[in-house]
Structure formats: C-alpha cells, structure tokens
Amino acid sequence: MTTATETSRRTPNGLRQFRILIRLWWLQMRRRPMRVGEAPKISGAPTFLLISVLSAGYLAMIAWQSVARNVKEDPGRFTWHMLGVLLLGFATGLSRGAGKLQVRGTRNDAFLETLPLRTLARLGLQFIDTFTFIPLTLTGVLAAMSVHGTLGSTSIVAALLGTVAFMSCYVMGAATIAWVRALGPASAGLWGGYTGLALSIVAMLAMFVPLGQLWVGDPHSISAQLADAWVGPSPMLLSLYVGFLGLGFGSYRVLAAANRFGIDQLDPQIRAPKQSKGFRGRVALERLMMMRQGGRALLILYVFLVGGALSLLATPVLTRLPASSFIFVTGFAIYLGALQTIGQAARAARADQQARPFLAALPMSPHQVLDGKARALRLLLIPVLVLLVVLAIASLLRADSSYTYRIVLSLLALYVLVDGAVSIAFLSTGIGVLGIGGSQSTTGYSTQILMLPLFATVLAPNDWAATTACIATLAVSFESRRAARMNVRWIDDPADDVERETTVWRALLAASAFFAMQALSYRILSLFDLPMGYTLALSFASSAVLLGLLTWRNDARIDRPRFLPNHPSYWLLGVLAGTTSGLLAREFAKLIPPPADAADLDFSGGELAAMGVMMTVIAPLVEEYFFRGWLQRAIAADLPADRKKWAFAIGASAFALAHFGTYGVPQLILGLLAGWLFARGGGLWPSIVAHALHNGVVLLLGE
Amino acid sequence: MDDLAPETPATPADPTADPAPGAVLVSVRALSKRFSEFVALDSLDFELRAGEVVGLLGPNGAGKTTTLKLLLGLLRPSAGTAQILGFDCTHDTLRVKERVGYTPDEPQFYDFLTGRETLDFTISARGLAPEPAWTALTQNIELFDFEQQLGALTSSYSHGMKKKLALLCALVHRPRVLLLDEPTNGLDPPTALRVRELLRREVAAGATVLVSTHLLDMAERMCDRLIVMNRGRMIGGGTASELRAQAGVAANASLEDAFLKLVGA
C-alpha cells in the first residue's frame, strides 16, 4: 500500500518521456481528431461564453464611448498595455495549469489516472473563465481606446483579433506547463505556478505602469507604429495573429494527445499540505478548502487587479474622463466579484456532493451547510468589496449622488448574491433531490444569469431601473435560499416527495434576467443614434424574447399553462378588465405624472407604431405568459392548500413591483384583474387581451 | 449552529441519562421500506440494548444498508417507526445524528482536507469542545496507528485508511449508539482485531453497536447477538448457537452452514 506521506516517486528520464510524448502526439494526429466541442460541454462553457461575450462587448462599448471621445491617443502607454495583455494571457495559462496540477497531483496512483491533464486541456479550451475573461475585457477596451470615437468595423476586427491573441497565449501557457511537467522534475508544477505568478505581476506592471517607456528611449516612434498596426490590421499583424492561432492550436493538440494517452501517469506528484497549526472550526475549514481549490491564486490575482483598477483611476488618462468611466470600473469590479462567487459556489457544492457519505452522518441543518459556504465565500470577496467601497467614496467626493446610490445598491446586491449563488449551486447539483438536476451546465446557466441584474444595478438607464434590478437580485437570493433550505438535506431517498423542488426562485431568476437585459440593451442601443421610440421598443423586445425563452424552457418543471378559457364569458371579462384598468391608469397619470425621463418625448409616427407593437402585442404576450403562466402558478404550488387562492395577489404585487418606475399602482390593478381571471380558469388569452387593452388605452389616450 | 434548537435537556424519558446496562437504546417497530415496486425492508422488528454488539447479517441486497440508512434518517420509512434514544429517526433526524456514530459502507471525505482537518470539521460540526475531543481521539489514533497519515489529504487515502478515518469520525463524540456499515471490510487482520477491541471498550462503557456485515467469521467473533436478514425480512436472530439451533444444524457446525441453511441457499 502506498502511504500518503510518500512525497516523491521515481520518474522516467526526460529524454524517454520526450520520446513518448512525441510518439503519443503522432498517434493522436493520425487518429480522428478530438472534437473541440467536447471540453466546453463538460464545463458548461457555451452559455457562459455567450453571457461573457455579451458582457464583454457591452463593457467594451461603454469604454469606447467614454474613453474614445475624451482621450485622443497615448500610443506609448497603449503598446505597453497591449504587450501586457498578451503576457498576462500566457502567464495566467501557465499559473492556472500549474495550480491545478499542484492540487490535483495530490491524488495517489489509484486516483491519478489522466485527471490533471484532462483538467488542463479543458482549461486551455475553456476560453472564457475567471482568469481569462478579465484580461480579455481589457483587450477589448484597449482596442476600443484606439478607435478615436467611431464604432467602425476596423475597431471590431481589432477587438476580435486581440481576443484571439489572448486566448492563443493562454492555451500556450497551459500547454507549456504540461510539457515542462511531463519532461521536468516533480516540482515543475509548483515552479510553473510561481513563474506564472511572477509573469502576471510583470504583465500587470506593464499594463498599469508604463515602465517600459523608461527602457525604450523614444517609445513613440516604435509604439505609434504598433498602435496604428493594431487598429488597421496590416498584413504583418494579421500573419502574427495567424501565427498565434497556429501555436495555440498546436499546443492544444499536444494537450489532447497527452490527455488521450494518459501521459501524466508518468509523473504523479504527491504533495501533502503543511501541517495545520491547532484546531480549526468548520467555517475556517470551508475557507481553507476554497483556498486550496484555486481560491488562493484567485485572491492574489484579485488583489493585483483591484490595485490595478485603482491605479488606473489615478492615472491622468482617466481623470480626464466623465463619470461614466467610473461606471465602467464598477462594472468591472462587480464582474470580478460575481465570477468569483459563482465559480467557488459551484466548486463547493460539488465538493459537498462528493463528500456526501461523510456529511450525511453529521448533525448539520441545511441552513448551517449553506451558511458555512456563504461565510467562507464572503472572505474571498473582500478585495472586490474594498474596491467598491473606494469607488463609493470617490463618487461622494465627485458629489455624484446617483452614482453613489448605484454603488451602494451593487454592494448590497453583491453581498446578498453570495447566498443566492451558493443556494443555486446546491440546488443545481441535485444534492437535496436525488437524481434531479445535477448537470454542471445547469449550474453554470442558472448562476450566471444572476450576474445580469448585478450589472443592471450600475448600468441601468435610471435609478428606478437600478432599484428594480437590485430588488430582483435580493428576491432571487432570498427565494433560492429558501428553496435550498428545503432541499439541501442529506436524504438518499429517490421516492421522497417531501423534498420537492420549489420553482419560485427559477421564475424570479428569469424575471431578474429580463429586467437586466432591458437595462443593458437600452444602454447598448443608445450608443447608436436611434430615435428614442425605437430604442425603447427594441430594448424591450430583446428582453421580452429572453424572458419568453426562459419561461418556455423552465416551465417544463411545472406543466404548461392553459391558454383557452373554460367558458367564453372570460373573453368578455378580459375586455372589460383591460378597458377599466386602462382608464383608471389614465386617471392616475393625470393625478401623479410618472417620474420616467421619457415623459415629454415627442415620438414620430414610426416610433409610435414600434411602441404600439411593443406595448400591445409583445408585452402582453410575454408578460402574461411569465407573470400569470409561470410565476403565479409557481407561487400557488408553493403555498399551503388553504392559502393557494391568494397566489394571484402575490403575483400581482410582483408584477406591480416590476413596474416600479411608474409607481406600479395601475399595474397592480391590472395584475389583480388578470391574475384573478387566470386563476378562475380563464386561461391566458383573456388576460393577454386585458393587458393589451390596458396598454393600448394608456398609449392612445395618454397624451 | 445558530439554527439548531438547543440540545434538549435530559428528561426522565431520555435514556441518555440512564447508564444502566440493558437499557433499550434503539427500538425498531414494523419498519418497512419500499422503493416503488421493490420491497427492500419488510416489517422489521428489533431492539438494541446498552452493552451489546449486534450483527446484521445477510446476503447482498438483504436490506442491511437500508436498515442503517433508515436509522440515520437518510431514508424515510414506508411504514413503521425507528427510535434511537427516544428520538424518532425520521422526524428528529438532527437530534438522532447528534447522538449516533455512523460509518458508511464506502467512506468519502472532502478531497481538499487532510485527515486531521476532517476530524476538526467533525468536531466543529458536532459543536464539541476541541481540546477534550482531541484528547479522547488520541487513544483511538494510537490504536489504529494513524498519526502518520493524519497530515495527508484524504484524497490520497486507500480504502482501508478511509475506513479507519470514518471510524475515528464516528467516535469523536463518544456516541452511545454506533451504526457501522461493513466496518472491517478492506482492513487488514491486525487492524480488524483492533476495531473489535475498540468496540468492546465502547460497549463496556455502556454503548450499543449495530454492525452490518457479510463476513460471518468476524460476526461470530465480534457480536453478542446476530440478526439474519434475507430479502428485507428477518429470518433468524439470537446468539450464534441459537442460530445453529434455528437452522437445525449441529452445535459444532460452522456459522456459515447455519447461515446458508437459513437463507435457503
């Protein structure tokens, strides 16, 4: 029996290993290639990718607008930024891979198999993750900085190429460490980690402090050319990118070969952690586990990134910028925090599932299990929370009360989000309910939606929308926590209907994505010079599509709603309800004019038509489908039998809260009427008719 | 810890307060468990008293693990009740778990904690004072010669080492009821012997032990009393010699013969 204290093992000599690796690689090349799609599927990357790319594009555009208009150019600084991004890509690949190997290498022979390299190969392919995304965003921003205020195809190409270059460097870093580890001594993984960290620091310095300018006499002559080349892709630069891509792809093939043939078995590295000093409590041990599962490296990197962001705030470039650049930095901080939270929560949930036989015997309530994780997670969030607090103080100094309010909202939302992320991770890994859920992609999908309302707290067009987004985040966190407390019990029973799935949190998650999407698409659309009416209609339509899809996808968990009424008289009641509430809304608007900024807009005919379609067709369909067809029924399913009849009122309150920006009173009346009709067996159509009439009356007679 | 009701004070009905040997610590009444069509456990009745080691014998699929999981509240019974120290195993799961030591059939721990940290975790999750708990643990660690391995991550442990750690975890709070699922499977003979010594010591101090196993040899040597199960039913019970009588084999026949005859193989 191999004892765990054994710390080293005989390794075949380097040359032989090299030969084996080459041979395996050759074998791999001759076989059918491994499908690239395989790796992201394991990690749930596609949806993550989608959301990340959307947010990246969005952040880039924000920066575009604000930066490009105010900073003409600073090519010397720009070049060093660019080089820093590439180096950082390589370094993060290196340290990420090494970190994994170091931790995973602690398994003994029986467990070793091909795990570390498979993990590595996956990481290499998983382009957008915690580490990669951050520099990626910077790349996009840098590309944007060089565009001088226009939103042209050149700048988009530049941003894409920058992304490709970064990803290639990342895969190269991961592959390099695999090679070094296969060829070198047992400590290679460890040293790879240190090297990666050191390179990251250098890269950060290069990015944030243009030290390089000290070494190159006149930076402008060289770097101006480079910067120009970056903006307009010259043949030389294009070939450079193609070269990067080729190297990245080649490195991936090496990893795939090694993975396929289990090359890593040649070099198991068994490391025991340092002996702990004295007793540690449960929460401290939860923290320790998170640290060992990559949290330590993450924390260090975050400290650097936060430092970098703060130093960026202090540079002359950004002091010339308007308040919106602060919004960009805040969005960045929130993104960091949310990614951190979501990733670690998912890891913690998986670790608990794996250690289930051990945990099942301990007298821990669901609350204790969830709370332990959440408390440990908040510790890892400290750098990001510090950044947000600093930003809040900075905004106080600028006397920008709206922005201060947004930061406080997002601080609150991020703090509470930890609970939501942990709960959703547990719910999605199917710990409470045996055999339900369980796929990692579900975890990723659900928790990543949580990021959207967080963004919206900062980026929403007005404070009302920001507040709505924050309320949505709080509601999701609260509801998912409640659902998890009912589910996260160590029950092995497949036939246990006591531990049922509560669906309200899923509905609220979809709603929060809807609000967030509305705010985000509004921001993006206002970058183009569209008339306001089109912007409003389009931003609503895009978020409505999202909500419709989410509803359609998720309501399979409860049976689909009925559309046709039990009795024809419901059609008449729907018409009556819609007209009445519409007229009441009009009277209400006369008494108290809505606070929205759009109050005195003058729409053209086309805009009015777009708004009309949005308000009388899309909104009624999607909102009724969601609020009545899903949320109301989810609430009813969750209430005890004698109180089920009040579900329509709770649903209507949520509906009114969603229309917070116009005080929600008319919508409460509409929600009560439509919800009551639906609950009485009216089906969805009469409610949709009522909603459409209400909106129609408000739109046509509202002047 | 915050959410947990404070430990109920020992009432006269609470047998924890009663150290007398022979007190009933575990009682199982007409316990049944059905997984849709499949009957895993059919109206099981037994009692465990302080000061005895009882073996749960049976072929694979007899319902041994199901019984233990029902006792720990990991499954909900289809009918019948199980009580440990006066607490209902289905509805008072947390109180039962506070008072019971359990080792699973296939122990698994947090990969990223060492053995020592796993024990720390157990102590903390059970709300025990660290100092006395570790003092009590030292003796068991020495018995298993486990000091050396405590510093290694549990993911590097062999099956036998995991079994030992699971036993150490189960004994952290000196429970009066021990539910052990195949405790000596995968252990070498000297260690298995030490496990027996350890259980004897706990039983002498007033505990009761329920051991599920299919190793007949070990069962005969370790247990005061045996419960033989087949297809979810109890088909025999008593001391080894009583079992031989029930099976109708000679008094000097091996327990294996008696067992095979009872399960009708």
Image (tube, coloured by chain):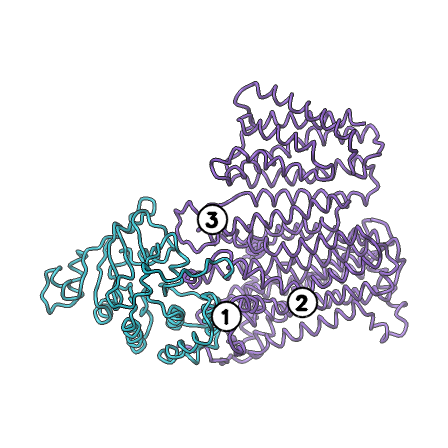
Chain colours: A purple, B cyan
From the viewer's side, name the closer residue of A414 and B177.
Answer: B177
Chain letter for the residue marked with disc 1 in the picture: B
Say whether mark 3 and mark 2 are on the same chain. yes
In this rendering, which labeled residue sits more in front, label 1 or label 2? 1
Residue type highlighted by circle 2? Thr
Q: Quadrant of residue A336?
A: bottom right
Residue B91 lies, in percent from the top left, at 38, 52
Label 2 lies in what chain? A
Query: Is there one chain holding both mark 1 and mark 3?
Result: no
Element under label 3? loop
Q: Quadrant of the N terminus of chain A?
A: bottom left
Q: Is residue A655 left or right of residue B94?
A: right
Q: Is residue A80 above or below residue B74?
A: below
**Which residue does the numbered mark 3 point to in the structure image?**
A436
Q: In this view of the protein, which residue sits in the foreground, A424 or A238?
A: A424
The image shows residue A301 at horizontal and vertical percentages of: 68, 68
In the rendering, which numbered label is found on residue A92?
Answer: 2
Mark 1 — residue?
Answer: B113
Between B36 and A589, which is closer to the camera in this rendering? A589
Front disc: 2 or 3: 3
Query: From where the camera sits, is residue A15 visible?
Result: no
Q: Amino acid at mark 3?
A: Ile
Label annotation for residue B84: none
Taking depth in this image into account, of A345 and A228 the one nearest to the observer is: A345
Looking at the image, the residue that sits furthest to the front is: B12
Give the quarter of the image for residue A391.
Answer: bottom right
Q: Is residue B44 left or right of residue A605?
A: left
